[in-house]
Image (tube, rainbow, N blue to C red):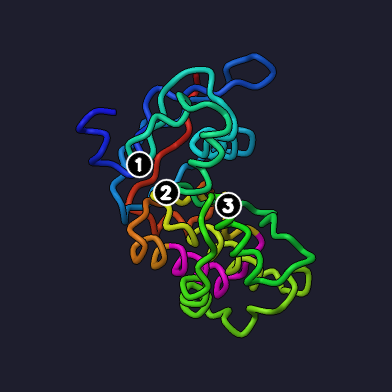
């Protein structure tokens, strides 16, 4: 870690992605302070989702460096990388990956436990209240509407106070009103939390709300 690394919530450089052992995409270099938001754009198959997986310490890039909260994430052993992800990286993917058989509140508690934290019920209630889902705290996740599940996914991504929030096509299949609400939720949440936001999208409604828009590149 260098002194300059501490100035950024997220810094990535020279990140190249592989598919079937072939280089196919390059992630634009990123320098993101807390509270800032960037969109990664590109046609279908350009590597946007794979880029998020690389930034999330889930799928190793073939080249490059990713530093989150001052830590070179791909230098960590696998078990430490998983724990670090839970503590410092919030994920909002299209399929949400909620645990269907338990309540909204239990989903948030599980995210804390996964990161090695003691569940903080008051923090969970504060996030649910801010996102307009406090009345759903005891509802099972499989009984939520899509919009409700999206809000739960955002709350879960924020529960551990991450340095970085990564969202994959967060407005896909949403009408204008719900898309605007989701964009507002993400922007407001990361600004309040002091996190950096990276979204993948081709949705003009999202692009217009970002601080920066960067296209995926060829390797």
Work out whether mark 1 precedes mark 2 in sequence or the reverse, and give the earlier one.
Answer: 1
Label 2 SS: strand
Magenta-colored span: 173-186
Is 2 situated left or right of 44 in this image? Answer: left
**Contact between labelled residues 2 and 1, with CB atoms less than 8 Å apart:** yes
Q: Main secondary structure of the magenta part?
A: helix
Label 3 SS: loop
Q: Position of residue 214 (x, y in %)?
A: 40, 40
Work out whether mark 3 precedes mark 2 in sequence or the reverse, and give the earlier one.
Answer: 2
Q: Which residue is mark 3?
A: 169
Q: Residues within 10 Å of mark 1 (few under 14, many from 20)?
A: many
Q: Specify whether residue 174 is painted magenta.
A: yes
Cα distance between the residues tagged 1 and 2: 8 Å
Residue at 32% of width from left, 36% of height from top? Answer: 70
Q: Which residue is mark 1?
A: 69
The quarter holding residue 5 reads top left
């Amino acid at each position: 870690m260098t002194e300059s690394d501490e100035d950024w919530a997220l810094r990535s450089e020279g990140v190249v992605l592989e598919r079937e052992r072939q280089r196919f995409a390059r992630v634009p270099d990123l320098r993101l302070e807390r509270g800032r938001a960037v969109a990664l754009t590109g046609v279908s198959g350009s590597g946007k989702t794979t880029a998020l997986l690389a930034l999330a310490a889930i799928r190793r890039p073939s080249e490059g460096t990713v530093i989150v909260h001052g830590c070179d994430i791909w230098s960590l052993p696998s078990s430490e990388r998983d724990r670090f992800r839970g503590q410092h990286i919030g994920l909002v993917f299209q399929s949400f990956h909620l645990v269907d058989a338990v309540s909204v509140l239990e989903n948030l508690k599980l995210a804390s436990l996964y990161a090695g934290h003691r569940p903080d019920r008051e923090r969970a209630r504060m996030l649910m209240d801010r996102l307009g889902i406090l009345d759903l705290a005891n509802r099972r996740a499989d009984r939520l509407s899509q919009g409700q599940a999206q809000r739960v996914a955002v709350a879960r991504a924020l529960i551990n106070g991450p340095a970085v929030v990564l969202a994959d096509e967060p407005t896909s299949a949403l009408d204008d009103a719900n898309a605007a609400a989701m964009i507002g939720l993400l922007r407001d949440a990361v600004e309040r939390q002091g996190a950096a936001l990276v979204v993948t999208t081709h949705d003009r409604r999202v692009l217009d709300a970002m601080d920066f828009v960067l296209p995926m590149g060829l390797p």
